[in-house]
Image: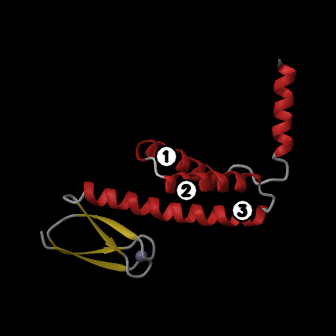
Amino acid sequence: MAGFMDRIRYAVTRLFYGRNGFDALSYTLLGAALALNAINSFIKSIIIYIIIAALIYFGFFRALSQNLAARRRENNAFLGLFRRVRSFAVLTYRRIVGFRTTVYVKCRTCGAVLMLPRRRGKHTSICPGCGTRVVVRCIF
Ligand SMILES: [Zn+2]
C-alpha cells in the first residue's frame, strides 16, 4: 500500500515539475468557485454555472501553467490589490468601532492615517512617518 501511495506522490510531483503550482490567486479562484457553487445550489442559474466552470478552469490553468513569470506577475498584482482592500476594510472597521473615542486624520504629506484621541477643540499633532504638523479640529 505504501508503494502505491509513493507512486501517486511521485506522479503528482512529476506533474507539477516546472509548473506554477497553486498560489494565492489559484486558491482564491477555486474558493470563489466553491462559494458560488454553494450559493448556486439554491439559485440554480446557468450563468453562474458557467462562471463557476471558468473559475475552476483558470484556477487549474494557473496551477499547471509553465509561464512562471506571467503567473507570478498576476499573483503579485492580486496580492497588492488584496492588501489594499484588506487594509481599507480594517481601517473602516476601526473607524466604526472606535468613533466615539478616536479620530482618524490623513496626513497631507505622506498619506498615513493617524489615530488620535477624540477631544473637543483644535489640536495639533506630528505625523510619526514624516514629521509634518497635522491640525485636528473636533467639533463634538
Ligand atoms: Zn506624514
- How many residues crowd mark 2 within 10 Å: few (<14), some (14–19), many (20+)? some
Q: Secondary structure at mark 2?
A: helix
Amino acid carrying mark 3 in the image = Arg
- How many residues crowd mark 3 within 10 Å: few (<14), some (14–19), many (20+)? many
Mark 1 → mark 2, Cα distance in angstroms: 12 Å
Residue pictured at 19% horizontal, 58% vertical? 100
126 w.r.t. 65: above or below: below
- Number of residue marks: 3
- How many residues crowd mark 1 within 10 Å: few (<14), some (14–19), many (20+)? few
Label disc, if present, on residue 35 of the rendered structure: 1
**Front in this rendered view, residue 105 or 56:** 56
* N-term-proximal mark, 2 vs 3: 2
* N-term-proximal mark, 1 vs 2: 1
Q: Cβ of disc 2 within 8 Å of ligand 1?
A: no
Label disc, if present, on residue 67 of the rendered structure: none
**Front in this rendered view, residue 20 or 121:** 20
Residue pictured at 60% horizontal, 54% vertical? 55
Amino acid carrying mark 2 in the image = Ile
Q: In screen coordinates, is 132 left or right of 99?
A: right
The answer to whether mark 2 and mark 3 are in CB contact below 8 A is no
Residue pictured at 13% horizontal, 73% vertical? 139
**Front in this rendered view, residue 83 or 105:** 83
Amino acid carrying mark 1 in the image = Ala
Q: Cβ of disc 1 within 8 Å of ligand 1?
A: no
> Disc 3 marks which residue?
71
> Disc 2 marks which residue?
51
Q: Secondary structure at mark 1?
A: helix
